[in-house]
Amino acid sequence: MSAPGQAEGAARRPSRQRDAVLGLLEELDGFRSAQDLHTLLRERGDTVGLATVYRALQALVDDGLLDVLRGPDGEAGYRRCSPSHHHHLVCRSCGLTVEVAAPPVERWTARVAAEHGFADVRHDLEVFGTCRGCAARRG
Amino acid sequence: MSAPGQAEGAARRPSRQRDAVLGLLEELDGFRSAQDLHTLLRERGDTVGLATVYRALQALVDDGLLDVLRGPDGEAGYRRCSPSHHHHLVCRSCGLTVEVAAPPVERWTARVAAEHGFADVRHDLEVFGTCRGCAARRG
DNA sequence: GTGCGCATGAGAATCATTCTCGCATATGCC
DNA sequence: GGCATATGCGAGAATGATTCTCATGCGCAC
Ligand SMILES: [Zn+2]
Ligand SMILES: [Zn+2]
Ligand SMILES: [Zn+2]
Ligand SMILES: [Zn+2]
């Protein structure tokens, strides 16, 4: 064995950089890329390496503090999210994100997986659309 | 408007390479990466450029003949799929893929999007698990 | 048959992400 | 406090998938 991010039982050492990344995500709305976050931190005068941003994001995801979303271009987006299972409603124009629970989807997933003999089931569901604000702005 | 891949009304010129890519996908089961497909074609003695494989895959996706799925490593997988809307049950061990319809999910998606004022809604849903065969093989 | 224009292929370029490695620093022990 | 050790950091190189460039090939309309 060997966990890449964090060995089981080992403590995570506190870090100004990781706190900075998390703090930045706390005050942002939608999903942001690692590169974006790095740029934003730099603009604030916070000297932090790009590799460190990636390491911090991985650690935060491992700790269940962030949600990851991969866009069609392959770039990963990160967002501060609640720890319980949920899904997202994302505006493809302004990035506005709403967390939603989807009990019918959870039920359907479990049932159809069982019917086909699949075990240890996980699922990804994201809903994309245009929010009311953006729809109005466009006429 | 303007489609990136194919201008509206313009014909797609037939191509041995595109047919080869589609033909290969017809006889394969799960999602395959562009690089995989390129290697397979080369091994068959079919001389085809990597860039051409990417171009063919994009064209086929634009024509609705293929489904795309992006793995956690960012690599895109392509699969020959039925043209109607559906979702996938994918074995994370052997890649076995089953197409499934999800009416409850479609209903839930439409309802929750409407409730939050989102228009022009699309969604991505993929279910991952371990198929019966792989579960048995592991004990 | 000719000519135009899209298609191709080899390699370069791009871009996000990861790795390397020497240095900084927190933590635990004395 | 002071030292030993392991983890975190930063800059730049390396990786790997995807896209771009451009010279050449070839199908199709005439
Ligand atoms: Zn919006
Ligand atoms: Zn769910
Ligand atoms: Zn399987
Ligand atoms: Zn659906």
Image (cartoon, coloured by chain):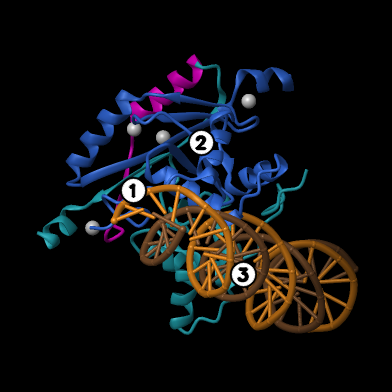
Chain colours: A cyan, B blue, C brown, D orange
The amino acid type found where label 2 is placed reads Arg
**Badge 1: residue crowd in 10 Å (few <14, some 14–19, many ≥20):** few
How far apart marks 2 and 1 lie (CA) works out to: 24 Å
Q: Is residue A63 visible?
A: no
Badge 2 residue CB within 8 Å of ligand 3: no
Identify the disc placed on residue A51.
Answer: 3
The amino acid type found where label 3 is placed reads Ala
Give the magenta-colored segment's residue range. Answer: A89-115
State which chain disc 1 sits on: B
Q: Which residue is mark 1?
A: B11
Tell me, yes or no, whether dots 1 and 3 are on the same chain.
no
Of residues A26 and B66, the one drawn nearer to the viewer in this rendering:
B66
Q: Position of residue B18 (x, y in %)?
A: 51, 44
Q: Tell me the element at label 3.
A: helix
Compared with residue A108, is residue C12 higher up or lower down, i.e. above or below? below
How far apart marks 3 and 2 lie (CA) works out to: 34 Å
Badge 1 residue CB within 8 Å of ligand 4: no
Query: Of callouts 2 and 1, which one flags the residue occurring earlier in the amino acid sequence?
Result: 1
Horizontal side, residue A101 vs residue B99: left or right: left
The amino acid type found where label 1 is placed reads Ala
Q: Position of residue A103 (x, y in %)?
A: 34, 29
